[in-house]
Image (cartoon, rainbow, N blue to C red):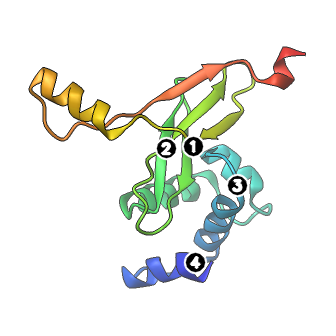
């Protein structure tokens, strides 16, 4: 946690109670969370939804969190370790919205081939997989 708060301090930002609590919730979560999920995980009265939105905007601007979109209309946020580019993929249940982080990725050679064949430069990708999780299959 001190590494996370140190990143804020280096930008001359205060470590408020809500910011520290939000960082701890994101650090402990194995999956990306919506603003509402973050608020629900906070102790009652710690802060309001507007504070969560402002905090997430700040953390995203500082590249401490990555915003994820899973086509359900809700942005989700995941903590990014310092020095990490945040590049990874997810498998999302289309029924309950459970999210699983996928370790596998496309080879760099495929990106280079796609770029070359289409005359592009600096090609990257973002890929999300969707399906029905084991729990929802029952």
Distance from Cα at disc 1 to Cα at disc 4? 33 Å
* Relative to 95, 64 lies left or right: left
Asked if residue 101 lies left or right of residue 132, the reply is left
Tell me which residue sits at (69%, 61%) in the image: 25
Specify the quadrant of the image occupied by residue 106: top left
Question: What is the secondary structure assignment of the residue under circle 2?
Answer: loop
* Residue picked out by circle 4: 16
Q: Earlier in the sequence, mark 1 or mark 3?
A: 3
Q: Is residue 132 left or right of residue 49?
A: right
- State the image coordinates of residue 131 (x, y, percent, origin top left): 66, 18
Q: Residue at x 52, y 52 (%)?
A: 53
Label 4 residue SS: loop
- Residue 30 percent coordinates (x, y): 69, 51
Q: Quote the CA–CA distance across marks 2 and 1.
A: 7 Å
Circle 2 packing at 10 Å, graded few (<14), some (14-19), many (20+), is: some
State the separation of the CA atoms marked 4 and 3: 20 Å
Which marked residue is nearer to the observer: mark 3 or mark 2? 2
Query: How dense is the environment of label 4, judged by Cα within 10 Å: few (below 14), some, or many (20 and up)?
Result: few
Closer-to-camera residue (138/121): 121
Dot 1: element? loop
The residue under label 1 is 103
Q: Which residue is mark 2?
A: 88
Q: Pointer 2 and pointer 1: residues touching (CB < 8 Å)?
A: yes
Contact check, label 3 and label 2, Cβ < 8 Å: no
SS for dot 3: loop
Read off the residue under disc 3. 29
How far apart are labels 4 and 2 at the CA level? Answer: 30 Å
Residue at 42% across, 56% down: 60
Q: Are marks 4 and 3 in contact (CB under 8 Å)?
A: no
Looking at the image, tell me whether mark 3 or mark 2 is earlier in sequence order: 3
């Amino acid at each position: 946690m001190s590494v996370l708060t140190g990143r804020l301090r280096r930008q001359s930002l205060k470590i408020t109670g809500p910011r520290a609590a939000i960082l701890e919730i994101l650090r402990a979560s194995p999956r990306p969370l919506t603003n509402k999920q973050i608020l629900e995980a906070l102790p009652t009265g710690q802060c309001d939804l507007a504070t969560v939105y402002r905090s997430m905007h700040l953390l995203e601007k500082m590249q401490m969190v990555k915003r994820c979109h899973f086509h359900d209309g809700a942005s989700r946020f995941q903590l990014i370790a310092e020095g990490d580019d945040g590049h990874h993929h997810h498998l999302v249940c289309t029924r309950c919205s459970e999210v699983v982080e996928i370790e596998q990725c496309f080879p760099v050679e495929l990106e280079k081939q796609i770029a070359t064949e289409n005359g592009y430069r600096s090609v990257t990708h973002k890929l999300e997989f969707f399906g029905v999780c084991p729990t929802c299959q029952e």
